[in-house]
C-alpha cells in the first residue's frame, strides 16, 4: 500500500492519470488532421493558420516548468485537478468557437491547462508507486500512453472530422475531462505540498512566453507587413528585449525556471540546441504534410489520419522500450545521431514530393523514416540532457529540454510556414499555376526542415559524449518519460 491506497485502487488511479495525459497528447496531433477544415470554415490564411497550433504550444512550453513549481507549492493533486478543469473548459470554448480570435485564445488557454497536467502527472505517479518494480511498470504504461497517443490522435481526428466536423475534435474532451476529474477526486490522496516556501518564477514565465509569442507573431505576419517594415522590426526588437530580460531574471532569482548553470554542461547545452532544431523540423512536418495531402492530393481528413498511422505506430513501438534498449546497447550518441539522420532523409524525400504524388512512392517512405527517426531519437535527447547533471537535478534538466522542444517547435513552425507562404505568393505573382506554386512552398518548408534535422544530427554526433545510463530506477523513470514527449 502507498499513501493508504490499496493495490487495486493504485492501478485504477494510474489509468485515470494516464487518461488525463492522453487527452493532452491527443490535442498535439488531433488538430493537425482538422487544420484544412478549420482553415476553410473560419477563413484562416495559410500563415495565420499556424496560430491554431502555436497558441497551444507557446503557452504549453512557457508554463510547463512553472506548473511543476506550483504543484510543489500547492499540492500535485490540487494542481492536476485545476489543470484538467482549465483544459476541459478551454476545449469546450474551442469546440464552440465561431471566429479565429476565439479559437486561438481558447487554444492558448488549453496549452496552459495542458502544461499544468503534464507537469504534475509524473510526480503523482512517482508518489503512487514507490517500489522500483511497480514504478517501472507504471512508467512503462505512462510512456506507452504518451507514445501511442499520437496514433490515436491522427485516427480520431480524421474520423471525427470526416463523420461530424472539426468542432467535435475539441468537444470529445468534455466527457473525458469530467471522468478524469471525478476519478482523481475519488482515488488520489490529497497529499501535502513538497515545497513550503519556494519562490515562483512568475516573471520568468511571463517574459519568455511573451518574448516567443511576439517573435512568432512578427514572423507569421512578416509576409503581409513586410520583413523590414517598422511594425515587424519593432516586434522583433521587443521580443529580443524580453528574451534578454528573461535571461537576466533567470540569473538572479533563487528558483529559476531555467537554471542557466545547466548550459555550461556540454551534453545539456547540445541536447537543448538539438531539441530546438529537431522540434522545428518535426512540427513543420506534421503541419505541412497534412496540408500537402489534403490540398494537393485531395485526401479526406480520415485518409490523412490513416496516412500518418505508420509513423505514429512506429513511434509508439519505440516508446514501449525499443529505444531504451538501443541506448543501453550502444550508448546515447549513436541512437541520437541515427534517429536525426533518418528523420532528415525522410524530410528530404518529402521535399521532392510532386503535385500529383502517390502515397506509396511520395508519402509512405518519408513517413516511415520520420517515424523511425523520432522513435529512435527521443530517448537519447532527454538522456543526453540529464547525463551531466546531478541526480537531484535530472527532473529539472528533463523539463528544460522539454520546454526547448516546445519553443523550438513553435518558432520553427512559424518561420517555415511563413517562408513557404512567401515562396507560394512569389511564384503565383509570377504567373505559376496555383497548385505548382503551393507545392513549391511546401517543398521549401520540407527542405529547410531537413536541413535543421541534418544540423541537429551533426551537432549530436560531434558534441554529445557517449555514455550508457546506469541500471537504476530513477534513470528508467526518466527514460520512460521521454517516450511520452
Image (spheres, rainbow, N blue to C red):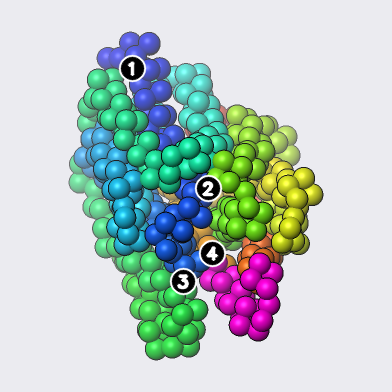
**Labels 4, 1: front one:** 4
Task: Identify whether 301 is placed above or below 295.
Answer: above
Give the CA separation, mark 2 to mark 4. Answer: 19 Å
* Residue for point 43% across, 44% down: 165
**Labels 3, 4: front one:** 3
**Labels 1, 2: front one:** 2
* Residue for point 61% across, 82% down: 429
Q: Quadrant of residue 182?
A: top left
Magenta: main secondary structure equals helix
Q: Earlier in the sequence, mark 1 or mark 2?
A: 1
Label 4 crowd (10 A; few <14 / some 14-19 / many >=20) = many
Q: Quadrant of the N terminus?
A: top left
* Residue for point 60% across, 34% down: 316
Return the residue at label 1: 2
**Labels 3, 1: front one:** 3
Q: Is residue 33 left or right of residue 335?
A: left
Instruction: Specify the segment rendered in magenta.
Output: 417-436
Return the residue at label 4: 412
Q: Can the viewer see residue 297?
A: yes
Dots 3 and 2: beta carbons under 8 Å?
no
Amino acid at each position: 500500500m502507498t499513501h493508504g491506497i490499496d493495490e487495486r485502487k493504485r492501478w485504477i488511479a494510474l489509468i485515470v492519470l494516464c487518461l488525463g495525459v492522453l487527452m493532452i497528447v491527443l490535442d498535439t496531433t488531433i488538430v493537425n488532421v482538422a487544420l484544412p477544415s478549420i482553415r476553410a470554415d473560419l477563413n484562416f490564411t495559410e500563415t495565420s493558420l499556424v496560430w491554431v497550433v502555436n497558441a497551444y504550444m507557446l503557452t504549453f512550453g512557457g508554463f510547463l516548468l512553472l506548473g511543476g513549481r506550483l504543484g510543489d507549492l500547492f499540492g500535485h493533486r490540487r494542481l492536476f485537478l485545476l489543470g484538467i478543469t482549465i483544459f476541459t473548459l478551454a476545449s469546450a470554448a474551442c469546440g464552440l468557437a465561431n471566429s479565429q480570435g476565439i479559437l486561438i485564445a481558447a487554444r492558448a488557454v488549453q496549452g496552459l491547462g495542458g502544461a499544468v497536467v503534464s507537469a504534475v502527472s509524473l510526480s503523482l505517479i512517482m508518489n503512487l508507486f514507490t517500489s522500483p518494480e511497480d514504478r517501472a511498470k507504471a512508467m512503462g504504461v505512462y510512456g506507452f500512453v504518451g507514445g501511442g497517443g499520437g496514433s490515436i490522435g491522427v485516427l480520431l481526428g480524421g474520423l471525427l472530422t470526416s463523420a461530424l466536423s472539426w468542432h467535435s475534435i475539441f468537444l470529445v474532451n468534455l466527457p473525458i475531462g469530467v471522468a478524469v476529474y471525478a476519478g482523481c477526486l475519488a482515488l488520489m490522496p490529497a497529499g501535502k505540498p513538497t515545497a513550503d516556501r519556494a519562490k515562483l518564477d512568475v516573471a520568468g514565465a511571463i517574459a519568455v512566453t511573451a518574448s516567443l509569442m511576439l517573435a512568432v507573431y512578427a514572423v507569421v505576419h512578416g509576409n503581409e507587413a513586410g520583413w523590414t517594415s517598422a511594425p515587424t522590426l519593432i516586434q522583433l526588437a521587443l521580443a529580443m528585449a524580453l528574451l534578454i530580460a528573461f535571461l537576466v531574471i533567470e540569473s538572479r532569482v533563487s528558483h529559476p525556471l531555467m537554471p542557466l548553470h545547466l548550459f555550461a554542461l556540454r551534453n545539456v547545452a547540445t541536447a537543448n540546441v538539438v531539441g530546438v532544431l529537431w522540434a522545428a523540423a518535426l512540427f513543420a512536418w506534421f503541419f505541412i504534410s497534412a496540408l500537402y495531402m489534403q490540398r494537393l492530393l485531395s485526401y479526406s481528413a480520415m485518409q490523412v489520419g490513416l496516412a500518418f498511422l505508420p509513423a505514429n505506430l512506429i513511434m509508439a513501438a519505440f516508446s514501449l522500450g525499443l529505444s531504451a534498449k538501443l541506448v543501453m546497447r550502444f550508448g546515447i550518441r549513436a541512437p541520437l545521431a541515427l534517429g536525426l539522420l533518418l528523420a532528415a532523409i525522410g524530410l528530404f524525400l518529402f521535399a521532392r514530393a510532386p503535385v500529383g504524388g502517390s502515397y506509396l512512392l511520395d508519402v509512405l517512405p518519408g513517413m516511415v523514416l520520420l517515424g523511425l527517426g523520432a522513435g529512435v531519437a527521443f530517448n537519447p535527447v532527454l538522456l543526453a540532457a540529464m547525463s551531466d547533471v546531478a541526480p537531484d537535478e535530472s527532473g529539472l534538466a528533463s523539463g528544460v529540454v522539454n520546454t526547448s522542444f516546445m519553443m523550438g517547435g513553435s518558432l520553427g513552425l512559424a518561420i517555415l510556414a511563413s517562408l513557404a507562404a512567401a515562396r507560394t505568393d512569389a511564384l503565383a505573382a509570377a504567373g505559376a499555376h496555383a497548385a505548382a506554386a503551393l507545392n513549391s512552398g511546401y517543398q521549401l518548408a520540407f527542405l529547410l526542415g531537413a536541413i535543421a534535422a541534418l544540423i541537429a544530427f551533426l551537432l549530436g554526433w560531434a558534441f554529445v559524449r557517449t555514455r550508457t545510463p546506469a541500471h537504476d530506477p530513477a534513470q528508467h523513470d526518466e527514460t520512460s518519460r521521454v517516450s511520452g514527449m
